[in-house]
Amino acid sequence: MSDLQLQKKTVESFQKVRENLHQVIVGMDDVMDALFWTLLCQGHALFIGVPGLAKTLLISTLSELVGLKFNRIQFTPDMMPSDLIGSEVLEEDKATGKRVFQFRKGPLFCQMLLADEINRTPPKTQSALLQAMQERKISFAGTTHTLEAPFVVFATQNPIESEGTYTLPEAQLDRFLFSIPIHYPNSADELEIVKRTTSPSSQDLQPVLKASDLMEMQKLVLRVPMDDKISEMIVRLVRRSRPEEKQLPTELAEVIRFGAGPRASQGIALAAKARALLSDRFAVREEDVLAVAPYVLKHRLVLRRLRDRTEDQIVHQILQQV
């Protein structure tokens, strides 16, 4: 199959995924866009939103439609790394009578993981995800276990409740390609949600893709061409977020402690390619960069206390500088 044929298949497949998602999920088109970009980029995403906005339903339904093995973990303050990775269990071989340690895999061994309220568990357990997210591997008792591809982590975080939570370290935040805000539905969507969830309904969802199809599409994203001028624009954009570069206006330099690192440049470039591909184009435009950049930058900026501005406004001002 040629690249153009695979591009057409990618666009049609994800349009079918969206149509099937809308049988279960009302609205949330922007969130679905970001989800699709994350999948095609082999990335991970952090969802910021209050409880009850269908985050779990959205991701579990998506896993069915793209044919990935799905696990959900509810993070709690008493969770240990072994609750994620697994542990060794002493078992007796019935044939020989010998006792040997066998590794029992934890819920991390899947293809799509939903880490619910990831900031409710201590840093020691949070860090257990780092190697898995970066290398798609797990090391335990001197043995390295490779996770089944394609491995993606979607984590959720409640932005309004801080009691009993642990702030995610910058090193872990940087492993997330996107930070995706989940907002309240508008009036019409909320009315439709009430009607659907309080009436008899049945959806027979069938997988649209297989894991092997998705992996071929992920490779196609890497082959989407990008003009040097677009690449230079991305690097210039990310470097403008760093106060030490002396390119920021004073009003921004005063509120940004640390800017985004090179991983942000890589993330924007890759996500822009994914957006172009799903927009039925085999070339990246400026509009692709500007559409994905806020999702990549927001969680990578370390800001001082903000009074009259929001994080979104800071990112918007940085984009305006380029």
Image (spheres, helix red, strand yellow):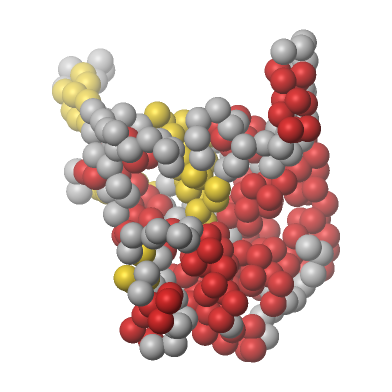
- Judging depth in this view, the residue of 6 and 171 nearest the camera is 171
Left or right: 274, with 315 as reference point: right
- Judging depth in this view, the residue of 241 and 132 nearest the camera is 241
Q: Position of residue 74 (x, y in %)?
A: 40, 29
Left or right: 180, with 106 as reference point: right
In this rendering, the count of numbered labels is: 0
Give the residue drawn at x 61%, y 64%: 292
Give the residue drawn at x 39%, y 60%: 306
Quadrant in the picture for residue 89: top left
Left or right: 3, with 232 as reference point: right
Q: Position of residue 224 (x, y in %)?
A: 69, 73
Against 263, residue 99 (above or below) is above
Quadrant that contains the C terminus: bottom right
Q: Position of residue 166 (x, y in %)?
A: 27, 42
Against 215, residue 317 (above or below) is below
Quadrant in the picture for residue 188: top right
- Judging depth in this view, the residue of 11 and 193 nearest the camera is 193
Q: Residue furthest front?
A: 308
- Judging depth in this view, the residue of 261 and 185 nearest the camera is 185
Give the residue drawn at x 43%, y 42%: 159
Against 294, residue 189 (above or below) is above
Q: Is residue 177 visible?
A: no
Q: Position of residue 289 (x, y in %)?
A: 64, 72
Q: Is residue 161 visible?
A: yes
Give the residue drawn at x 18%, y 28%: 100
Quadrant that contains the N terminus: bottom right
